[in-house]
Image (cartoon, rainbow, N blue to C red):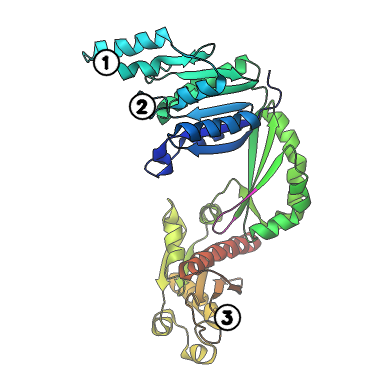
Amino acid sequence: MIEETKCEVITVGTELLLGQIVDTNSSWLSEVLANSGINVYYKQTVGDNFDRLFSVFERAQKRSNIIFVTGGLGPTDDDLTREVAAQLFDTQLEIHQDTMNKIEGYFISRNKMMTENNRKQALGFQGGLVFDNEVGMAPALHYEHDGTWWFFLPGVPREMKWLVTEQILPFFKEKGILTKQLYSKVLSFQGIGESTLETELQDLIRNQTNPTIAPLAGNSYVTLRLTAKAATKEESETLIEPVEQQIMDRVGTYFTGYGHVPLEIQLLRLCQEKEITLCSCESVTGGLFASTIVQHEGASLALKGSIVSYTNEIKENVVGVPSSILDEFGAVSEPCARTMADQTREQFNTTIGISFTGIAGAEPVDGQEPGTVFIGISSKEETVVHKVVLSGGRNDIRERAVQEGLKYLLNFIKKFY
């Protein structure tokens, strides 16, 4: 009986190492096993070479007590998984008659001649178990060697998934392995970097046991995945709740929701709830704010329109920014961003107007350093301008400016509406 699972996943195939086939098996298998409460500690990929396969299998035997191997169970000479494992286990391979009958029946039913090498797919380990594959030819094989449970699966994803779901996991339950499962809760944060978030929660992360805390950085957000191993969902929530509260006490001001709901979707939902309309005036972002909004269904209920005012001429003649502001302060300035937001809101007759003006290039403009962006938000109640300094390449700055604008806009609406 295995008390604590130390699982390893091995994928076999030279084509995986050459990049000719993308390995989706190990990621799927790792997720399913983790969600079933089986701790996956290692993953390896190895080519179709006897000595290297033996070395990988030998290492896995020493450090893991549940090992999944996918691939190398086919009929050709380079399908070596069974032979290598049999040598490690010091056991013989033998024909599994039910599988052999199935293979022969397949060829007979299609009026095809079965070649001798197809018999190889009916081989199993002497003293081991064979799990029938109802969606393919090669079965899954199981062998226990020196207290370690080995499972060998076909490399074809559809077959591998069926065998795990319909055969292996029920086998684990029968043996009393799956007494607990993993339950996760994802917290999303905006406006705080991954390194800062980790610093604020360093002691919690360092001392984590059950639940565990896993930070994950996106392009403009950070998530924390809290994962508890428990017998029931209710028990997991009891374990997660006090840890979540500690996190919220420290960094709750940056919390934007559970899971990762993009800020633009949060904004659209809030605008629809409050019956708020928007417009944008974009220089540095070049319409990216509006584009981010309109990619989602229901955008027309909130966004009435946008102006891309990339040059000073358009800012002055279309938007209505006075030449005196442009001459005195420049286009990349707080007064320009303020006026862009005010003028566009009035022209479009919306509840709120937002503006973006800044520098995405490599050289300073109007005395401002590259990465400087001014974001104006205008309403009848108040107009505010936020100055941010962003890092990265040209498109990184544009994308981050939009995310900053969405964040400030959400906070503005929550404050005044």
Work out whether residue 52 can be spotted.
yes
Mark 2 secondary-structure assignment: loop
Highlighted range, magenta:
215-221
| Left or right side of 69 for 5 | right
Snapshot quadrant of residue 220: bottom right
Residue at figure coordinates x 50%, y 84% from the top left: 365
Residue 100 vs residue 243, the one in the foreground: 100
Where is 381 relative to 151, above or below? below
| Left or right side of 293 for 380 | right
Mark 1 secondary-structure assignment: loop
**Outermost residue, left side:** 111
Q: Is residue 218 magenta?
A: yes
At label 3, the amino acid type is Glu
Q: Which residue is mark 1?
A: 114
Q: Is residue 358 magenta?
A: no
Q: Which residue is mark 2?
A: 77
Snapshot quadrant of residue 227: top right
| Left or right side of 238 for 162 | left
Gap between marks 1 and 3 measured at Cα: 78 Å
Q: Quadrant of the N terminus?
A: top right
Residue at figure coordinates x 55%, y 56% from the top left: 263
